[in-house]
């Protein structure tokens, strides 16, 4: 669960988000952040992660709730096999002297299999295309034992097949109990079975996902009707 109350956040003297409030959890389905570039979608995710100063209140439920996230850009300086990079996601964050569990390679391989990416197993991270790298980062998120997933434009580099595939996967993880917040411009690929759209307009409109609300949101964004 994530409850945001009267959130105001930005960078220095530039205020990007003002008086934003909402509640989301796994029962309500994924929360999709929609809006033009610079509207505050990434800023919200960074505030939830406590990466930037903010005023207001952000409550993630129980104190032991853990968060996994994928930023818009995620780069590493090391060139390591994909299987090893994904395995690193199994290391317990915040646990002193935590080491790689023995089951890590199997979990990593299963994540690759679930995404149809076993052919990337022994490829080095610096040899991946943009789309492959984005999928490998998602695979690492899948092996993390976290309760909340924050994803900032996780399908931006993916082809049409994988855009639909990844959103379907995220909706399935929500049904399994994950609280998921996604920033995306890929609204036409969203499942319409569950979830809400939070449109970053003047009033931060919160709407249940449906064909009608997706179409209306796309039209507003294309015309900048706010």
Image (cartoon, rainbow, N blue to C red):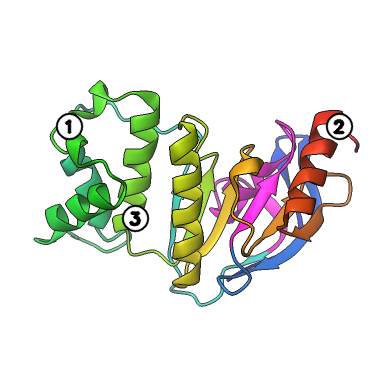
Residue at the location (18% across, 28% down)? 124
Residue 35, can we see it?
yes
Tell me if mark 2 has few (under 14), some (14-19) or many (20+) residues whose alpha carbon lies within 10 angstroms of its own. few
| Front residue (pair 172, 106) | 172
Which residue bears the numbered disc 2?
A: 224
- Disc 2 versus disc 1: distance between alpha carbons? 43 Å
Q: Residue 142 bears which disc, if any?
A: 3
Residue 100, can we see it?
no
Upstream in sequence: badge 2 or badge 3: 3
| Front residue (pair 13, 48) | 48
Upstream in sequence: badge 1 or badge 3: 1
Say which quarter of the image contains residue 142: bottom left
Label 3's element?
helix
Left or right relative to 77: residue 134: right
Which residue bears the numbered disc 1?
A: 80
User: Up-down: is 121 above or below 50?
Assistant: above
Q: x%, y% of residue 184?
A: 61, 41
Q: Residue furthest bottom?
A: 62
Label 2's element?
loop
* Residue 40 is a magenta residue: yes
| Mark 2–mark 3 CB contact (< 8 Å) | no
User: Up-down: is 163 above or below 100?
Assistant: above
Residue at the location (23% across, 50% down)? 113
| Mark 1–mark 3 CB contact (< 8 Å) | no
Q: Which residues are magenta?
A: 30-57
Q: x%, y% of residue 177?
A: 47, 72
Say which quarter of the image contains residue 100: bottom left
């Amino acid at each position: 669960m994530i409850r945001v109350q009267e959130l105001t956040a930005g960078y220095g003297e530039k205020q990007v988000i003002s008086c934003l409030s909402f509640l989301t959890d796994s029962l309500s389905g994924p929360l999709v952040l929609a809006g033009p570039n610079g509207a505050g979608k990434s800023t919200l995710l960074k505030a939830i992660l406590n990466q930037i100063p903010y005023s207001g209140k952000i409550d993630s439920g129980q104190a032991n709730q853990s968060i996994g996230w994928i930023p818009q850009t995620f780069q590493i300086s090391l060139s390591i096999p994909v299987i090893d990079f994904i395995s690193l996601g199994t290391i317990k964050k915040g646990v002193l002297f935590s080491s790689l569990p023995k089951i890590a390679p199997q979990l990593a391989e299963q994540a690759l299999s679930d995404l149809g990416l076993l052919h990337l197993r022994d490829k080095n991270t610096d040899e991946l295309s943009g789309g492959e790298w984005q999928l490998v980062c998602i695979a690492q998120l899948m092996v993390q034992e976290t309760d909340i997933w924050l994803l900032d434009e996780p399908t931006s580099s993916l082809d049409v097949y994988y855009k639909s595939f990844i959103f379907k996967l995220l909706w399935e993880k929500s049904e399994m109990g994950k609280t998921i917040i996604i920033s995306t411009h890929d609204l036409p690929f969203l499942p319409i079975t569950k979830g809400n759209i939070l449109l970053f307009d003047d009033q931060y409109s919160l709407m249940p996902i449906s064909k009608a609300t997706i179409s209306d949101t796309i039209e507003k964004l294309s015309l900048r009707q706010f």
